[in-house]
Amino acid sequence: MEISLGDRLAESIRDDGPMAFGPWVEACLYDPDGGFYAAGGSAGRRGDFLTSPEVGPLFGAVLARWMDARWEALGSPDGFTVVEAAAGSGTLARAVVAAEPTCLTEGRYVMVERSAALRSVQPTNAMFPGVSLSSVAHLADVGCISHGVVLANELLDNLAFGLLEVAGGRWHEVLIDREPAASAGEFREVLGGPVDPPAPVDAAACDPGARIPVQAESAIWVDTALGLLGVGSVLIVDYTSTTSAMAARPPSEWLRTYRGHERGDVPTNAPGTQDVTVEVAVDQLPDGAVVATQAEFLGAHGIAELVDEGRRIWEERAHLGDLMALRARSRVTESEALLDPSGLGGFTVLEWVRSSKVRSQ
């Protein structure tokens, strides 16, 4: 008889005591035998949440332009490598490759995805002849990249994170315990001992019960991505905040769960059945990033030109109603969603540039 993730977590807590929030999130999302993504959770209209690549191919087409701009800035080298982390089923990869960026003519596109189920439906070389596509499970599997880019759309918000709460004028670690006298699979939050916060936020100045995330895994991920590069860029797109701003807001605003495009339950309920996501505290990430909103970034890399081209193609082919015409028309509605300042357009884009000068230090 298969043991559920909830039962296994309850057994672990019984044997070892309350579990830190970070390992709890890691298990709920990525446990290979019961985590949310192993069990089929995914982005997309048929999935559990919608991200920019699922709006349509326009997002990928603009990113293809950014890739070419970075490639040209490095002298248009052969062997340029594009690494997409948290590639999922390959929706963004399909859009980027379909846009035919010049940097991939003699380059390669590597999809990084932890879920074997999602890797199994990613695009392959057979689908895109002439383009070098490959897939790996972990970023470390990519190896060193002499020149290229590493990008991740809505990844950092899904990496495991700790949680602290103010009690008695100090920050305390939030832990997960079993409910007393309850059946296996029922859990509650308890407070551990006092700890130092990941950023200078004075607990004494915060309301009792205020909370902040601890996003060490996100900082490690960015450092790892930068460490792979000889020269190039690391690009992150996500919804962000700062540690101090989150301390002043209700935790339910920045720590959320999703299932089937709806808000889910509290994170302690039904482990493995819902996405657990958190706003990214930019002040906990490595310094040096160029910061823009998604709307600003897309605007700087030619989204308006692509939309105008779509309008022109639609006007020329509307009477045909063929696939080319319909795709061209969809660029207008896609751009509205991608640029909406109260939605996806308000997301943050962070780009760390790795130059040869930095590499030699």
Image (tube, rainbow, N blue to C red):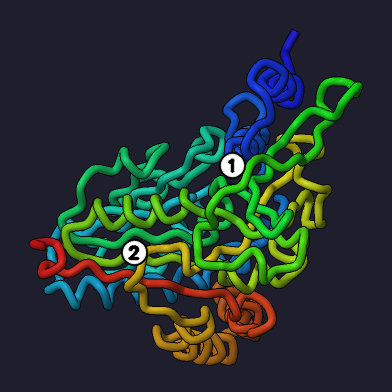
Q: Is residue 81 above or below residue 182?
A: below
Mark 2: which secondary structure? strand
Residue contact between numbered discs 1 and 2, judged by CB atoms under 8 Å: no
Q: Quadrant of the C terminus?
A: bottom left
Front residue of this view, candidates 137 and 58: 137
Q: Residue at x 83, y 21 (%)?
A: 184
Front residue of this view, candidates 218 and 115: 218
Front residue of this view, candidates 287 and 45: 287
- For disc 2, the neighbor class at 10 Å (few under 14, some 14 to 19, many from 20) is many
Q: Position of residue 317 (x, y in %)?
A: 57, 84
Residue type (three-letter) at the residue carrying disc 1: Gly
- Residue beneath disc 1: 22
Q: Is residue 98 above or below residue 66?
A: above
Residue type (three-letter) at the residue carrying disc 2: Val
- Residue beneath disc 2: 234
Residues under labels 1 and 2: Cα distance? 24 Å
Q: Residue at x 12, y 74 (%)?
A: 75
Q: Residue at x 18, y 64 (%)?
A: 231
Q: Position of residue 285 (x, y in %)?
A: 43, 63
Question: Is residue 268 among the parts visible in the rendering?
Answer: yes
Q: Is residue 59 above or below residue 33?
A: below
- For disc 1, the neighbor class at 10 Å (few under 14, some 14 to 19, many from 20) is many
Quarter where residue 136 is shown? top left
Mark 1 or 2: in front is 1
221 left or right of 51 in image: left
Q: How many marks?
A: 2
Mark 1 / mark 2, whichever is N-terminal: 1
